[in-house]
Amino acid sequence: MNSDVIDVNRTNTWENLKRLPAHTQKEWLQKNFKELVKVMIAAGDNDSGIWNFIGYACINNNLYREAEIVYDELLKLAQKHHQNHGLPAYLRGIAHFLQGRFQEAYSDFKLAHQHDLQTKNFNSPSSQAIAYMEETLFPTREMIRKNQAKLIRDLNTPRVLGNIIGQNVLRTIHKWNSASPLYSRGISQGGGYFLTLKNGRGETKGIAIDPGYDFFSIFRDLGMGIADIDAIIITHDHDDHTESVEGILSLLAKHNDYNEQRKTKVLDIFGSAGVLLKFHGLLSATDPFGNREINFKLMVPGSEITEIEGASLMEKHGFTISVKPAHHTERWTNQESSVGLIVHTNIPLPGNEKLNIGITGDTRYEVGIGKEYRAVQLLLLNIGSVEKEEGKLLRQHLGMLGCINLLKEARLGKPLLAVLTEFGEEFSGRRETISHIIENWTQPMEGTRARELRVIPADVHLEIRLEDLNVRETDTKVFFPYKMIGVDESDPEILRYKFNG
């Protein structure tokens, strides 16, 4: 029908408004609202039906401010003539509530309830509305307020990594590999690594490496927060190496929104081509003042990374990176664009060497890949699983034989601490044995008495002091030379590191 049939000045035609489509109703109400109010005021409170008809129509069409005006005028009329003001007060409360003006709505509902009690109307909707707000809405809002205040306190917690972990330490925050944390019914944590290094200015810097499933929850359980992370290194785009990245970046954004110093924290992120594609929408993030929050550096095999945004990495974070090849397909490129790497530090070791940390990332074994890691004294190996088919190596991971071959190419007969990581959950109760097999078969066949190479399985308890490659004993918290550390796997879920003498 045509809206001309509805005459603003003839209230008996207003019922025709119901025949209009919803969007046309709203447009008509908005266009004629001021005139409608004049007509209703002129009619006074003798015809409350026209007031409620327009009030309901406004509420139904999300015109809550207009509905508030309607019931505000009707309430004034009812109070002036000492008539029932409970219903208009209640309906004005609804209009206030739907605008998010909860305190005003609460006052309206209480006003309506007082009138209802006076008229002995004990089953009025006003009492339900008051109970809903007192028992649910207000307590929920108070909980939100407290949680927000706690979040802001947490975001402003000062750096503590120097006290909790210390300077020049590698902590494995890693348990099982790829899919295990998704389907396991046990304690199946993923994770990554956390590295602390002294930079060129003597500051302790925190570097998260491949932060996958549960990384940040484990990290927080250690007592640290977003303030303790300065850089992230990501070898490839699979979830078990990236799952916590988005959460870290979300906390970074909140930290920059709420930190009391109004100082922008910037994270330096180093990632593969797949990582760039996966997170490209987040890498241009800025704080509320337009400052950049993230610097990203692409890692391509064969490249040497010594700076980021013109700043020296050694001066800023205490390391540089040599990017190595890894034979492992990324999801976002559908190519073998994953990387391994060597983290070069300024930490002096005996013999005028500087400590180099190798990280294979996920890769299958290819002949010669171990030669890429000949310069390292500490090597993190992602085993993945054991070989499943007779006479065939794994296609995407090192496996047991790949680890042996890689280690022999890398450091045969030379001192090396190898940390075996990213086990499939089928290794539960067998991690120490598998590590021992790899260690034995990697040694030179001549059988020297002094074991130059140790292979230690990683768990969330493993902590290595980089200045001397000593490992912290789980129970006493004392560091011992890695050659004197054994592994207790009596509880298959949790490895404990102990002094072996």
Image (tube, rainbow, N blue to C red):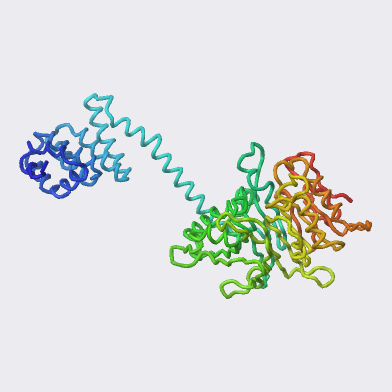
Q: Residue at x 89, y 58 (%)?
A: 444
Q: Is residue 230 visible?
A: no
Vertical side of 12 occupied by 384: above or below: below
Q: Residue at x 24, y 24 (%)?
A: 120
Vertical side of 47 occupied by 209: above or below: below
Q: Is residue 217 left or right of residue 170?
A: left
Along the line of sight, the residue nearer the viewer: 471 or 102: 471
Q: Residue furthest front?
A: 391
Along the line of sight, the residue nearer the viewer: 480 or 231: 231
Vertical side of 104 occupied by 153: above or below: below
Residue 91: x and y in percent read: 23, 37
Residue 144: x and y in percent read: 45, 45
Vertical side of 65 occupied by 193: above or below: below
Image quadrant occupied by the N terminus? top left
Residue 461: x and y in percent read: 73, 49
Q: Residue furthest bottom?
A: 310
Q: Residue at x 66, y 40 (%)?
A: 187
Along the line of sight, the residue nearer the viewer: 34 or 144: 34
Res. 226 image quadrant:
bottom right
